[in-house]
Image: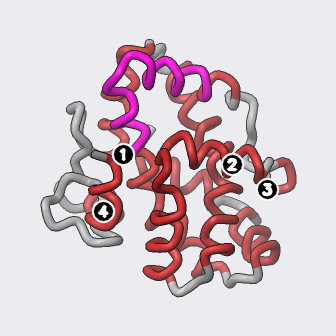
Amino acid sequence: MDLNSILGALTAGSAVNDMGKQFNMNSNQVNSVITSALPTLIGAMQKNTATESGASSLAGALASHLGDGINLNSANLLDGSKILGHILGGNSDSFISALAKKNGVSTNQAGGILSAILPMLLGLLGKGQKSNNVGIGGLGGMLGAILGGGSAKPQASGGGLGSLLGGAMGDKNNNGIPDIIEGFMK
């Protein structure tokens, strides 16, 4: 599992068009929001695995969303909003605002897209965890590998989609976390 396959799964089929219709956006805007947000979301999850309780909480969330498919019609937006709060703590609103500004959409549109994809993202990560037999202690490494590095600190890969996405919102120190959100995750 890598960033390309996750991005492909979240934007496959009619998902992007369906989200565009639901949130009054064109497919390019939906793709842009997802592409810009994905490295930060995965990086924040990886950061949360630094503590035993954070890793355990994430493992529980991955297990509970294991059956979630890639289907907007079954996406629970309230659940997605709660997931965002767990991932980013009290910084969800700031992240949504920055994401909306970066992509030229409203905060309601950006927040809606995130709420729609997060249960699906956790389902994909849960399937990856299960198929690769990754234990709670290995979640940080699994997420780091998805971002393009295997360390406990997110890293963008040299070239390719990892560095493109990692820098989508500005990443001056090339750690895979956009500068605008990095301060919130400390």
According to the image, label 3 marks what residue? 72
Occupied quadrant, residue 151: top left
According to the image, label 1 marks what residue? 43
Q: Nearer the viewer, mark 1 or mark 3?
A: 1
Please name whichever residue, 97 or 175, is drawn nearer the observer in this view of the structure: 97
The segment highlighted magenta reads 43-61
Earlier-in-chain disc, 3 versus 2: 3
According to the image, label 4 marks what residue? 178
Q: Main secondary structure of the magenta part?
A: helix
The percent position of residue 139, horizontal first and vertical second, equals 40, 24
Left/right placement of residue 19 relative to residue 122 reads right
Please name whichever residue, 86 or 68, is drawn nearer the observer in this view of the structure: 86
Residue type highlighted by circle 4: Pro
According to the image, label 2 marks what residue? 80
Please name whichever residue, 72 or 185, is drawn nearer the observer in this view of the structure: 185
The percent position of residue 27, horizontal first and vertical second, equals 65, 79
Residue type highlighted by circle 1: Gly
**Residue drawn at point x = 77 percent, y = 50 percent:** 78
Q: Is 19 placed above or below 84 here?
A: below
Q: CA distance from mark 4 to mark 1?
A: 10 Å
Residue type highlighted by circle 2: Gly
Picture quarter with the C terminus: top left
**Residue drawn at point x = 29 percent, y = 56 percent:** 182
Residue 48 colored in magenta in the image: yes
Earlier-in-chain disc, 3 versus 4: 3
Q: CA distance from mark 2 to mark 1?
A: 17 Å
Q: Are marks 1 and 3 in contact (CB under 8 Å)?
A: no
